[in-house]
Image (tube, helix red, strand yellow):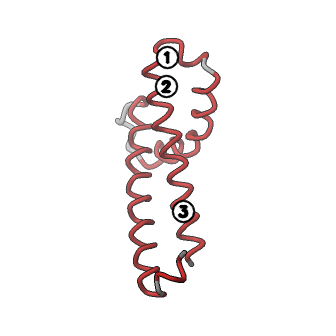
Amino acid sequence: MLLLISSVKLIAEIALLALFGQWVLGLLAGQKKDQNIFYQVLQQVGKPFVLVARLVTPKFVLERHVPLVAFLILVFVWVGATAAKISHCLRIGVALCQ
């Protein structure tokens, strides 16, 4: 169970960092962000989560806001996984979680 919780938490962390890095790099690169190879790599890492966010959001949500929705969903997933990991570790003993 701990492996599953830790895996969900790790996937959420990687996706969050990719989306955040994409946002920061987009600010720094400006209009030429689509030509930046690092931006494209981060975009590919975050793309599955953005597609899932597009599926769960209503159609009136603008396309440029979908990555923000994906980021917020991932924040909630990360918080839930962290709370589940803490609860599980307290239940089985902190020494077994290290």
Tally of marks: 3
Q: Which mark is residue 29?
A: 1
Q: Quadrant of the C terminus?
A: bottom right
**Could you tell me which secondary element the residue under label 1 belongs to?**
helix
The kind of residue on which mark 2 rests is Leu
Which residue does the numbered mark 3 point to in the structure image? 8
Q: For the residues labelled 1 and 2, say whether their Cβ atoms are less than 8 Å apart.
A: yes
Front position among marks 3 and 2: 2
Q: Where is mark 2, residue-wise?
A: 25
x and y percentages locating residue 33 in the rendered image: 53, 18
| Mark 1 to mark 2 CA distance (whole Å) | 6 Å
Dot 3 falls on a residue whose secondary structure is helix
Q: Rounded to the nearest whole Å, what is the CA distance between mark 3 and mark 1?
A: 31 Å
Q: Residue at x 50, y 31 (%)?
A: 22
Counting residues from the start of the chain, the first of labels 3 and 2 encountered is 3
* Disc 3 versus disc 1: nearer the observer: 1
Q: Amino acid at mark 1?
A: Ala
